[in-house]
Image: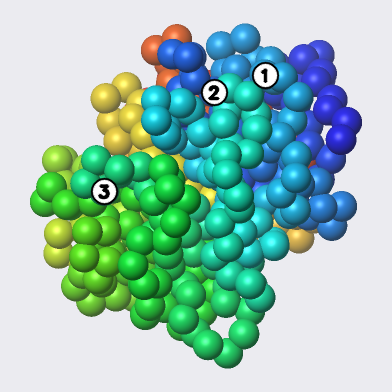
Amino acid sequence: MALVVNFWRSADLLGHHDDVVSAVAVGQMNGQPVAVTGGSGFNDDGTVWVWDLTTRQPLGEPITGHPGVQAVAVGEVNGRPVAVTGGYDGTVRVWDLTTRKLIGEPMVANRTGFVSAVAVGEVDGRPVAVTGGDWGDATHKLPVRLWNLTTRQPIGEPMTGHTGLVTAVAVGEVDGRPVAVTGDVDGTVRVWDLVTRQSIGEPMTSHTRVWGVAVGRVNGRPVAVTGSEDENIRVWDLTTYKLIGEPVPTGHTYGFSAVAVGEVNGRPVAVTGGGGGPDDDGMMRVWDLITRQPIGEPMGYTNSVFAVAVGRVNGRPVAVTGDGDGDVRMRDLSAYTR
């Protein structure tokens, strides 16, 4: 696959996939901040690129071999940085980011469907991945799975309860327990105890189709931030499973498909991306999670923003986005303050 890097076109453009950039994750590699992006779409780009966010250069050749990458997460296994990908083929794959080689065999999450969401965390000191997707058949038995990333084997039975496509997964901690938060096209958001693999509390409802989930903290309390087809941003208290305040209209038309959380100037923020209008222009917006109000003006794109992740480069908060044009961009968030 060809890669285009053109710093003259835009100061924040890192590079370009051949098709839609469907997934972005931010992490560390050899002490340096990196972004990992996955491509999919009509041309079935199927590549994963690793970007050095300090030098703004790709690191080595792309990772290939996973058709239609839909989801990417970054973690560490046995002291080595890894990327975990989910794809159209129903498999989950673990890649050594130093060698860009596949570790072991693909993990088969679904023989008839696809994997649309991946998050990485830790349970009882073991690195794990949580995956969601579409079962592709009538069994309704494979919405959410937990995987041991060291052995690359599933842990226990699938976590069931969702009734549709699981579109988003995030991992966090509530009352000292590792949890996963999942969103579904059935309009529900669920919280799962990753030790017991049981649903906690009642499903959180009031959405239409949920497209994005992120986990963070506001005023010391764990929260989930969700976005959906109804074009509103919602903040949920993960200890009470209740909505904090009213849903906030985002200005993203056709809903928004990407959300990440971080901190800017000491304030917890959410960064959202989505389609922006009939011509499929896209926008990225920044939100103060305490006031639930937008910060600054939206940043425009020429196509829908399908993926966003938040990190820090040289002490400055940044957002890394992937869009329908195949572009990977890094935006400085430090100017966003009230």
Residue bearing the label numbered 3: 123
Q: Position of residue 56 (x, y in %)?
A: 65, 15
Structural distance between the alpha carbons of marks 3 and 2: 24 Å
Residue sitting farthest toward the bottom:
138
Q: Is residue 121 left or right of residue 328?
A: left
> Mark 2 packing: few (<14 Cα in 10 Å), some, or many (20+)?
many
Q: Nearer the viewer, residue 151 or 209?
A: 151
Please state which amino acid type lies under the numbered disc 1.
Leu
Which of the numbered marks, if any, corresponds to residue 59? Answer: 1
Which residue position is annotated with label 2? 34
State the residue at coordinates (22%, 59%). Answer: 195
Name which of mark 2 and mark 1 comes first in the sequence: 2
User: What type is the residue that disc 2 sits on?
Assistant: Val
* Earlier-in-chain disc, 3 versus 1: 1
**Left or right of 68 in this view: 134:** left
Q: Secondary structure at mark 1?
A: loop
Marks 2 and 1 close (CB-CB < 8 Å): yes
